[in-house]
Image (cartoon, helix red, strand yellow):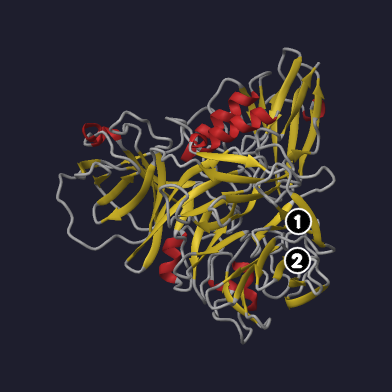
Amino acid sequence: MKVSFFLIGVLLSMVSVGQSMSDFYKIETLHIPEEIALEVGGVAFNDQGQIGVCTRRGEVWLVSNPQSPKPDYKLIGHGLHEALGLNYRNGIWYVTQRSEITKLIDLDGDQVADRYEQLAGWPLSGNYHEYSYGPEFLPNGDMIVTLNVAWHGGGRSFVKWRGWMLRITPQGEIFPFAAGFRSPAGFGVNDQGDIFYAENQGDWVGSGRVTHVERGDFVGHTASLKWTDDPKSPLRLKPENIQPNSELTLYQYAKLVPEIKPPSVWFPHGLMGVSTSDIKQIPDGFGPYTGQMLVGDQGHSKIMRMVQEKVNGVYQGACFPFVNGFASGILRFRFDQHNDLYVGQTARGWWAIGGELFALQRLKWTGKTPFDIKGIYAKPDGFEIEFTKPIDAQQAADASSYQIADFTYKYHQTYGSPVIEHEKRSINQVIVSEDARKVRVYIDKLRRGFIYEVKTPGITAANGEKLVNDFGFYTLNEIPKGSKAVFASRKSESTTGTKRASKRKTVLPEGWDANELVNLEISTIPGLKFNKNLLTVKRGAKVRLTFVNPDDMLHNFVLVKPGTADDVVQQALNLGLNGQEMNYVPTSDAVLTHTNLLQPESSETIYFEAPGQPGNYTFVCTFPGHGPVMRGTFKVE
């Protein structure tokens, strides 16, 4: 089973067009003793090169000799409440648990905490979704933490500062910094002291994204705005100032409400990841990407790459696949003094590709440079694409070597968003740089607030190497100033979902007797599961099936022919940008019937006739990342 999970991870993470990143970056697994459930919530290094690991079970472990085949593990703290962040400074471990930042203080020099001291605390309502993350140190010595909203009817802030980023002084004084956070599991600081946080798709969040956060920003989720009357609040925006069902995008809404901060980089859901996590800047000595940032993904068990630039004073940039194939869901990572990346992982209740419930792994650069898209940068009339090695100039000068399209997402209270306003861009001209490492691609139109899918399928290196990855997504908030080249205008091509005859019937078919129906009901439970593994009917039975989704994420119910589930799941993933619009149900003879993609806390009833051929059919959720495990048997007798 783990092998199939890994292969699915490869498909989710990149188009395998050349060598794999695994040829250039090696994943090494650290041994964990059998008696330790290392469900990693936080990772940090002390000044002796030892790794501190806090866990969701409330423990803190000190890992010595991490380069050895069997590192030493020492329990140095315990009894904490779901610790999801760890840091170290001046001999003290700082742990963020549900309700506070706790200082673990060693009084006798044995590296075991003798005193647990609250630095700063905040209230809890008891809702399971009230996760707390951090702390991350700022250059001035202050710390930042982020607090989830509760899960109840689309996200609530039942107690003060839920849905906020907080700044905390070394003395423990709390200052609310920014609002509008939903599930901000990851955040980091670049070498200029600028703060970035990663958000997961959900209510008010069309897709995963990374946002540059400054004091007084509102980043999208309205639940936190109930606390803006507090004298410490840096903004006065109220929930009623945001319409829950606007037809606007987040970028468009920001023009009406200046407190709104649009993302600097969108991570298209399912194509780049499903649950963004940690953010760290890449140091020198970790390949050709120095100064860029890594962004983890918990559900897809992978690390992505992000390249940002400032245009007209605003951050924007591109995201790319990087390394996949980790053992469990990535939540935290840190570079050590050797520029190796230590990756802490957990998956209990938060299913992830990889199959393990937890892991601690190390990512090492081999010293070899992959042939890759190094970065994408905005120009007044298109983009500059930079590569890690010289390219074949003849291929690169051919406009057919590139594909560019743009799209965006809705900003509304509804969970997630389909891709909207999707258009293919025409390429007017391509100019290759003298060193053959960059190309200027001139396109027919640039639209502010849109995400650009940039593909380079026709590019190879001058030495014949193929790209390890041939696409990226650029978020355009600002268009650089400067003169534009003049070309004959071309009509843009709109791309929408494929229309097809519906296999989803939501009303009683004509001629059916409601009293003769077989009534089935199936629901979801946490951990990417249906509440039933088996549904049984007679062949040819007329079925009324109600699918209930009480979960806090999107799900569908798709019934497929025997032996076709894996193929249908892959076809759903291949729908790409059109996936959510098509409910992640591909046009396939293998699909017998299906529901819509259901919002959290919703349900749908469908009608269908059971197959006439007895056998074991499969029902599956085809939402990206769910299909490998969220399935069951539909037995026809």
The quadrant holding residue 607 is: top right
- Depth check: 580 or 27 in front? 27
Residue 148 in sight here: no
Residue 96 visible in the snapshot:
yes
Residue 570's x, y, as percent?
57, 29
Q: Which residue is mark 1?
A: 55
> Circle 1: is it few (<14), some (14-19), or many (20+) Cα within 10 Å?
many
Task: Look at discs 1 and 2 and give the one toward the viewer.
Answer: 1
Quarter occupied by residue 392: top left
Going from the N terminus, do you reach mark 1 or mark 2 first? Answer: 1
**Which amino acid does the dot numbered 2 rest on?**
Arg
Residue 221: where, in percent of width, then height? 58, 64
Count of marks placed on residues: 2
Q: Position of residue 236 (x, y in %)?
A: 55, 80
- Quadrant of residue 616 within the rendered picture: top right
- Circle on res. 98: 2
Q: Amino acid at mark 1?
A: Thr
Residue at figure coordinates x 65%, y 62% from the top left: 48
SS class, disc 1: strand
| The one of 128 and 351 positioned closer to us in this rendering | 351
| Cα separation between marks 1 and 2 | 12 Å
Pick the residue in front: 153 or 53: 53
Residue at the spot 48% in from the left edge and 70% down from the top edge: 193
Q: Position of residue 439 (x, y in %)?
A: 25, 44
Q: Are marks 1 and 2 in contact (CB under 8 Å)?
A: no
